[in-house]
Image (cartoon, grey):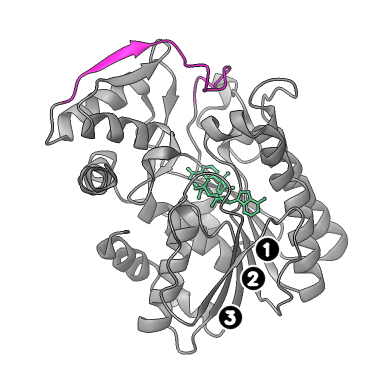
Amino acid sequence: MLLDTDIDEVLARLGTAAQGFSGARVLLAGGGGFLGRYFIEIFHRLNTDVLEKPCRIAVLDNFKVGSKVDVSVPGPDIEIHSADITADPLPEGPFDWIIHAAGIASPYYYRAYPLETLEVATAGTKRLLELANSRRARFLYFSSSEIYGDPDPAHVPTLESYRGNVATLGPRACYDEGKRVGETYCHIFHGYHGVHTNIVRPFNVFGPGMQQQDYRVMPNFASQIVNGAPLRVYGDGGQTRTFCYIVDAMVGFLLAALRGVPGEAYNIGNPRPEISMGELAARFQAVSPLPVSYQLTEYPDSYPADEPMRRCPNIEKAERQLDFSPSVDLDDGLKRFLTWAIDAYRRDG
Ligand SMILES: NC(=O)c1ccc[n+]([C@@H]2O[C@H](COP(=O)([O-])OP(=O)(O)OC[C@H]3O[C@@H](n4cnc5c(N)ncnc54)[C@H](O)[C@@H]3O)[C@@H](O)[C@H]2O)c1
């Protein structure tokens, strides 16, 4: 499913820092998702190959949207609970870390499930923070670069201190505002209860494991290539993003869990290159072993309007405090992802 070589690379890049997880008990919410499945695989491989004392992982997911794939349990060190973090009883622990990667991350799905999107980021975060507080566990919250909204160009590349330009009313508010409230919960539990919280704000992570039905731009383009269809570039194709290959992103997330300064938030992404969606389609064309064409098209109804025009992180804080340094360049990441996707999506049919 995932590439062993990518997991090897994450382990090598973490080096001895990974021993911080030795013997740890971890609750992973959202373990059925794209990022969650990497956490499962990495913790499992840490147990078999690296840690002096194995860690134990309790995975929570309601499997409602996104990946419908079975989460395989690679070993006895991992247990899976099917539960909604906004309502169902939570495992009791004890826990040393709670990693909150549950969410509804794809615009296609948060347009379809706005209330659930808001609730998992607000009520779900509060419940997991209460658990962290009662167990004295460290807390890693998956926020999003979307908390910056449509940034003022003077604030691109965007620092963590930028306050954002976000609509409370609009099709994206359920996600953007939900993530912002989730961050505020972290801030309160850190400030008033002393919970060691850290927030990561991922900037467009991509890689093997993204399902065709995910509907974010990377799996969309890969799926269109596999199906011999032109890549559909929404609007005028001028909106920009930066993309971070999964290996770099997972190293950043794990370093934030291990080394994050209490209460701090970190941009995790690759600041170069900031490219338009039209340019991204052209890059796919250049690296693809299959023929690729692309065309501009109107935004479909299934996609929430009002998308940000630019997105690019300033990662100096993560470089300084976590020793985070992304190293997989975009073309290399695209090749690795597309090679995997051609094989996996063909098998999906
Ligand atoms: N992948 C990225 O580039 C990216 C970028 C910014 C933010 N994030 C955030 O990181 C987190 C993980 O991202 P991902 O790409 O793995 O997303 P994903 O959608 O693939 O996975 C999220 C998982 O959370 C689960 N979930 C949703 N609501 C739940 C609930 N109420 N109770 C229990 N489980 C629930 C889903 O079933 C899914 O398996 C999300 O919070 C997302 O918003 C990701």
Q: Is residue 307 magenta?
A: yes
- Label annotation for residue 97: 2
Q: Badge 3: few (under 14), some or many (20 or more) residues near its Cα, within 10 Å?
A: some
Which residue is situated farthest in the front direction here? 349
Q: Is residue 38 above or below residue 317?
A: below
- Picture quarter with the N terminus: bottom left
Instruction: Say which residue appears at 38% left-offset and 15% top-offset.
Output: 237
Region in magenta: 292-310
Q: Which residue is mark 1?
A: 139
2 and 3 marks in contact (CB < 8 Å): yes
Q: Is residue 291 magenta?
A: no
Mark 1 or mark 2: which comes first in sequence? Answer: 2
Residue 324 visible in image: no
Q: Badge 1: few (under 14), some or many (20 or more) residues near its Cα, within 10 Å?
A: many
Camera-nearest residue between 133 and 2: 2
Number of marks present in the image shown: 3
Q: Position of residue 160 (x, y in %)?
A: 62, 41
